[in-house]
Amino acid sequence: MSFSRVLIANRGEIAIRVINACRALGIESVVTVAEADRESLAARMADRAICIGPSPATDSYLKPQTILTAALGTGCDAIHPGYGFLAEDPELVDLCAAHHVQFIGPRSESIRIMGDKLRSREFVRSCGIPVIPGSDKAETSAEATAFAEKIGLPVILKASAGGGGRGIKIVLDTNSVKEAFETAAAEAREAFGNPTLYVERYYANARHVEVQVLGDSSGKVIHLGERDCSLQRRYQKVIEEAPALSISEELRNRILEAAVIIAKKCGYENAGTVEFVVDQDTANFYFLEMNTRIQVEHPVTEMITGVDLVQEQIRIAGGQALKFDQPDIRFEGHAIECRINAESPLNSFYPTPGLITDWRPPEGSGIRIDSHCYTGYSMPIYYDSLLAKLIVHNTNRLQAIERMQQALENFHISGPDTGIPFLQFLINEPEFLSGDVNTLWLEGKLEKFLSSLTTSTNSTEKKRKHDRNTFC
């Protein structure tokens, strides 16, 4: 099967990314837009844009029946969901199947197995892959306390239907379980409509390592290496790298093999990411979760492999067999991605949507920008604050860091505040340069970063006063 027209059920930079992949494959693209996105770059670039409702995502991008109706009404053969919104919604997959529209992603059975954290833990354990010691669902704070005492502190409370860092709380002592449980359950209920929690052992000195996999309808699964996503703030990834650093080749190969086993066992088709926690104190790794969609950070894998993952998604959904065998995948150099958001580092990273009055991204060899922004674009208040993904590639990690430092320096954005100053601070820190980091490292740098801004501001003000006095 080959598609003639694909509906892109998303917005922002990932919509642009899918439009470009469709163009490369000679496929027409139709992009869905809510009211706030009528004048977006995606709407301008796609062959057609169709408005699907009011600006709030709950009234537009998060309505499966509306998305399907848009696809049928525009004569689309397939739907690409991007990431977020309905990308991991089995209801949309089933609706597509019932109306003979191809969903560009995995089968609904795979999403249901891996989308529920409790179910996926049990499934992966049955595959013989290590899973973080934890509990079944905890109905009450008393049950959570009992599980915590059994597993051993510290622990982390997680929403079974969770994602995006919501419904998660770290607990250091049993006296804190009750409050943490109630807060996490409330967050989970609001975000996912499901307050179910479970308890896991928490590893403080850990890395977050994930593996990109591709599977086709014949049961063939390959990996495209791993990414290190340890630098996070409030469980949200900030900087990603490929390949992962500071792990042995033996451990790397075990993690890659585990990811392929999991994907094969669940009959996985299309692109997916299997995520693991690596305990640096013991060099043990544990399954964390599987994301049954394209990831935000997929470009770093593309940069070191030369494989266009979105084009491969479309080909696989069209029934084509993978054209690669595992030995065909070659890894070259090192890639780093920084997520640039419209946010105020001085105001607890509060989102700063609004008009972009100047947009001048860096250019040059080994630099890639995935973005939907331009001078004159006004960021809506309704969605996430991602402005761009800045990706660099070079021969080795040190050279990639140097290229990222230069690229951030040459990224000029006026209008909204952005996280660029914080990113510049992070990539110049000695621990980042040496790779001596873990999933808590970035959070621990916030105070030092804010202090550096205060010191810089005071120094600038002193210089201004000195200059005025000298002039007088």
Image (spheres, rainbow, N blue to C red):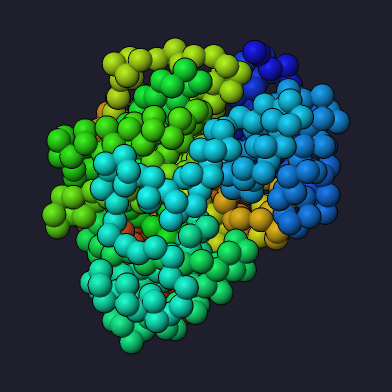
Please report the residue visible at 75 percent of the width from the left and 49 percent of the height from the top: 63
| Residue 470 found in image quarter | bottom left
Q: On the rendered structure, is 412 left or right of 470? A: right
Q: Position of residue 339 (x, y in %)?
A: 48, 49
As drawn, 334 above or below 161: above
Q: Nearer the viewer, residue 108 or 18?
A: 108
Using the rendered image of the protein, determine whether residue 447 is visible from the camera's viewpoint.
no
Q: How many marks?
A: 0
Q: Is residue 386 visible?
A: yes
Between residue 398 and residue 328, name the one nearer to us.
Answer: 328
State the quadrant of the N terminus.
top right
Measured as percent of width and height from the top left, residue 167 is found at 49, 67
Toward the right, the furthest residue is: 73
Q: Residue at x 43, y 55 (%)?
A: 118
Q: Is residue 425 left or right of residue 75?
A: left
Q: Is residue 192 above or below residue 181?
A: above
Residue 135 quadrant: bottom left
Residue 341 to residue 73: above or below: below
Which residue does the image show at 73% across and 31% down from the upper left? 98
Above or below for 314 versus 263: above
Quarter of the view holding residue 126: top left
Q: Residue furthest bottom?
A: 175
Side of 41 relative to 465 (left or right): right
Residue 340: x and y in percent read 50, 51
Q: Position of residue 87 (x, y in %)?
A: 60, 42
Q: Identify the residue shown where x is 38% and y is 75%.
A: 144
Q: Please name whichever residue, 205 or 220, is drawn nearer the observer in this view of the structure.
A: 220
